[in-house]
Amino acid sequence: MNESKKKYKGSPKGKEAEKRYNLSDKGHENRRRYNRSEKGKIICRKAAREFYQRHKEDPVYREKIRERNRKYGKSNKGRLTNKKAAKKFRKTPKGKMVNKNRKMKRRQLEGEGKITLGQWEELCKKHDFICHLCGKKIGGYRGNLGLEFPSMDHIIPLSKGGKHDISNVAPAHTKCNILRRDKSVEEFKKEHGYK
Ligand SMILES: [Zn+2]
């Protein structure tokens, strides 16, 4: 670029012209072509990385990204990408470990006892479909090994060594079950003023 051209580009008039060009179809097309070239891709990636580094702490930006990822994950293309990524991850040492731990945990947690649907229905009837946490009736039961059952709450949480066994479960509202988490039944009742 020669001197006078450089000067023109830096001038308000030159900047104005550049802006106009960038907004024109030709400018768009040109930029697109550049962004897809090897050199353009590298620069784009670098700019994206820098942008991310500058904004990663910004909660608004983070929420935006999360929202975008959520949307993408729901699209057909996103589902496929995620599936592929998950498959790839499972083959890495870390992925193998995660998978193994998950399997072991499940086996440990559920392997010791097994609750049949019949047993569960019987227990729910024994409790008269009353939530063992809040003491109120649980709706949604359709009976006769029906479709909907109360949420199965582990009296001693699995995470605290409780067994997945009919002697360690009781019916509860899904909401109560979720609210309780790993707290003991007594703790939960006290906290919420239930008797
Ligand atoms: Zn409840």
Image (cartoon, rainbow, N blue to C red):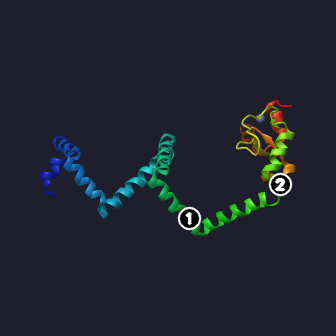
Q: Are marks 2 and 1 in contact (CB under 8 Å)?
A: no
The amino acid marked with disc number 1 is Phe
What x and y, as percent, mark residue 74? Answer: 49, 49
Q: Is mark 1 within 8 Å of ligand 1?
A: no
Ligand 1's quadrant: top right
Residue 168, position in %: x, y? 85, 49
State the SS at label 1.
Answer: helix
Q: Nearer the viewer, mark 2 or mark 1?
A: 2
Residue picked out by circle 1: 89
Residue 170, numbered circle: none
User: What is the distance, in whole Å, between disc 2 and disc 1 at their CAs?
Assistant: 31 Å
Quadrant placement of the C terminus: top right
Residue drawn at (61%, 69%) of the image: 93
Instruction: Locate residue 155 relative to residue 72 in the image: left or right.
Output: right
The residue sitting at 38% across, 57% down in the picture is: 46
x and y percentages locating residue 191 in the rendered image: 80, 34
Work out whether residue 119 or residue 163 is closer to the camera in this orientation and state it. 119
Q: Which mark is residue 163?
A: 2
